[in-house]
Amino acid sequence: MAGRRGRIGRVRTLVFIPAWNEGASIAGVIGDVRGSIPGADILVIDDGSADATAARAREAGALVASLPFNQGLGAALQTGYLYALREGYDCCAHLDADGQHPAAEVARLLEEVVADRADLVIGSRYRDPSAAPKPPADGPKTDDIGLFSAHRPPVEGSGDYRPTLSRRIGTSVFRFFLTLATRQRFTDTTSGMRAANRRVMALFSEHYSPDFAEIESLQLAVRQGLRVEEVPVRMLERTGGTSFLTPLRSAFFIFKGMIVLLVGQFRPRREEADERHDPTPRGGGRLGKSVEAER
Amino acid sequence: MRALTLGAAQSPTVHLTPQARILAAAIAIAFMAMILELIRRDRLQERYSVVWFVAGLGMLAGAAFPGLLKFVADAMGVRDTNVALFSIVLLLLLGLALNFSVIMSRQAAQITRLAQERALEQAREQARLAEKDLETEKEGL
């Protein structure tokens, strides 16, 4: 299956898009990805949509993996990581299907992974782009900004992301506890725009909480000794649909997240057994370097 | 075990009327019959029935040998037999409910993986077809 498709240079790249009832916006997102990351294969994970999401995606020329019933964002994302791992992609990225994530920004995340500066790269709407245009290789080191003061207004300009109050509270809480848990500063803990290499694929395709994908996965990756890095990105307002976060749901969401983080702290750290079980024939983390050497 | 229950039965202060004992025994027997019937109709798997049988037998034993209850209550250091009975039943049910949550979680994970495998197979098939189209196109040129 290692064909001519899905290559940027020598690096096989998969961009996957979890989508649940996003028939209105999915074709636009696929077009955006194709325009900004022309060499990548595009996989839409249709999470049991009731509308024509899968058909729209196929028409737009993307591969479609349809879950037979709605399984939640975590399971959908894991499906993407599984596909990337098993089909032998060197790196992968994912973005939301609602049009909030410009594909050009995803391309920047992928660059970080391809250059082997990090194993997992998170696109952050809150990190000030002017303060850290290119974070150092060993992770963000901008701790002079306090834990809570990190919420700065996004850069001025039309179409920038403006979160609601309940989201802002949730974001601060998670930011605080995740920073406490990982001892690494994260600003955008729930960002759905990420890029990853094969080490991350191997980890996330086995361990990925279906309920609380975004936060637990960060904690897990850091605990497993992977290099996780945030890159400031620009995000747009939603083009369609409404956020699922009502105040009550936010409270429940936050409560659940705290439990997840607490339990995550007691999980075993990096196991050597995991390395042995890594089914990749080409050897996870070294791949990025060999890619560079080949150039 | 038998000697134990007999010994306990000799203790005098157990307040269970014969009607209550007969009723409890009847319910226990009906309960176990229901479980057997559910298994027979494939509505309940054997591996999940064991725990209910044990519960039914426990109920029957309590009805047949009231001294048993008293013995357990004494062992727990509870003066009132009824309190002991309720605590035990409550704890058992709590344990059972937790057990089911564990089973449910495992099955939810299995269902998710099954759904993912199915979705992956679909995407692989689509990729294969696209690859094939590309090759026939090339041959055509």
Image (cartoon, coloured by chain):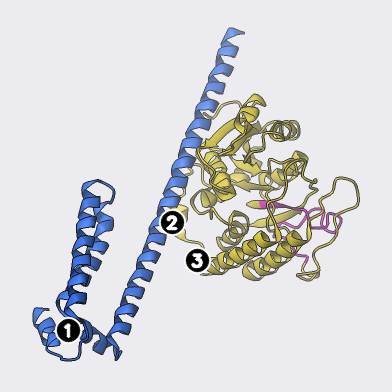
Of the residues under marks 1 and 2, which one precedes in the sequence? 1
Residue that numbered label 3 is attached to? A267
Tell me the residue that label 1 is attached to: B67
Q: Which residues are magenta?
A: A121-142
Given this view, does label 3 or label 1 mark the residue nearer the observer? 1
Identify the residue position indicated by label 2 in the image.
B105
- Residue A269 in magenta? no
Q: Find the distance from the CA under tag 2 to the CA under tag 3.
A: 18 Å
Give residue B57's position: percent from left, percent from top.
19, 68
Magenta region, main secondary structure: loop
Q: Colour of chain A?
A: yellow
Q: Is residue A131 magenta?
A: yes
The label nearer to you, 2 versus 3, is: 2
Asked if marks 1 and 2 fall on the same chain, the answer is: yes
Q: Residue at x 25, y 58 (%)?
A: B49
Dot 1 crowding, Cα within 10 Å, few <14, some 14–19, many 20+: many
Q: Quadrant of the N terminus of chain B?
A: bottom left
